[in-house]
Image: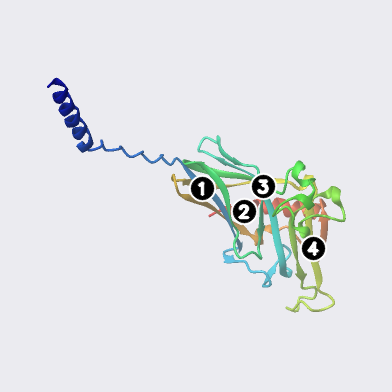
Amino acid sequence: MNTKLLTIAVLIGITFVACKKDDPVEPTPAPMVTTGTAAMSFNFMYGTTPFTLGNTYMDGAGNNVRFDNVKFYVSDIELHDDVDVTIAEFNDVFLLVDASAASNSFTLGTMDAQHIHEAHFSLGLNNTVNHADPLIAIYPLNVPEMHWSWSPTAGYKFLVIEGIVDGNNDGDFDDTEDLGVEYHCATDAMLREAHIHVHETLVAGATLTMAANVDVATLVSGLDFMTTPTSHGGMAPNAMAMDSLVTSIQGM
């Protein structure tokens, strides 16, 4: 009799357990996003109007110039907060800002979401990168026209300005008096430091693009292409162009 009762009790227990609903599983909370994406963009201007390659502009001496090529390197980008503390570094990011490009917007990388006061960066490349082998580099450090292949010790061209100056001021650029303009700013001594004010907050999970204008009128404000149409390396006109490049870049 006891055996029968025990068997019945066990069966009832099994039935009860089988019919009992499983306890609900608590969902795993999604991880909190604390970072965002930093980006930079550059917009070429001539004064207050958009700059377009192939149009006619003036150099610092008032000579008519048609620009065919304007480009430069940006590197060693650091972002600072309101008390000038570095809050993000993108030292492995290299930008080739090119007036002929369809876009000059670049993704830098991720960082903690916070307020960005200023962006600091180099115009050109540091000594180590400048003298590395471009044949094993990746874009934009493998662009042949941006390296002085005929003078390897000079390294990369930090800034390139090319075009034609109207030698007889007749409004066209196909006369024998018209001169080719070729400024290739290179050598370690041409490296410059610049910064822009940002004053924006990067929101977690979002992208903040720090925008800057490049004023070509300011870039060529100290140059006379009739007197010196060509300047390579680290000559005085090259140094002037690099100094002017610094002041030509302003946050939007």
Q: Do the residues labelled 3 and 4 touch (CB within 8 Å)?
A: no
Query: Looking at the image, is mark 1 or mark 3 nearer the viewer?
Result: 1
Amino acid type at mark 1:
Thr
Which image quarter: residue 80?
top right
Q: Mark 1 points at which residue?
A: 37
Residue 6 to residue 227: above or below: above
Marks 3/4: CA–CA distance? 23 Å
Mark 3 secondary-structure assignment: strand
Marked residue nearer the N-terminal end (2 or 4): 4
Name the front one of labels 1 and 2.
Answer: 1
Q: Which amino acid does label 2 sit on?
A: Ile
Q: Tag 3: Cα neighbours inside 10 Å, few (<14), some, or many (≥20)?
A: many
| SS label for mark 1 | strand
Q: Distance between the Cα atoms at labels 1 and 4?
A: 37 Å
Percent of width and height locating residue 38: 53, 48
Residue located beneath label 4 in the image: 182
* Nearer the camera: disc 1 or disc 4: 1
- Residue at left offset 87%, top offset 56%: 150
What is the three-letter code of the residue carrying label 4? Glu
Provide the residue designation for mark 3: 75
- Label 4 environment density (alpha carbons within 10 Å; few <14, some 14–19, many ≥20): some
Q: In this view, does 126 lie to the left or right of 214?
A: right
Spatial separation of the CA atoms under disc 2 and disc 4: 21 Å
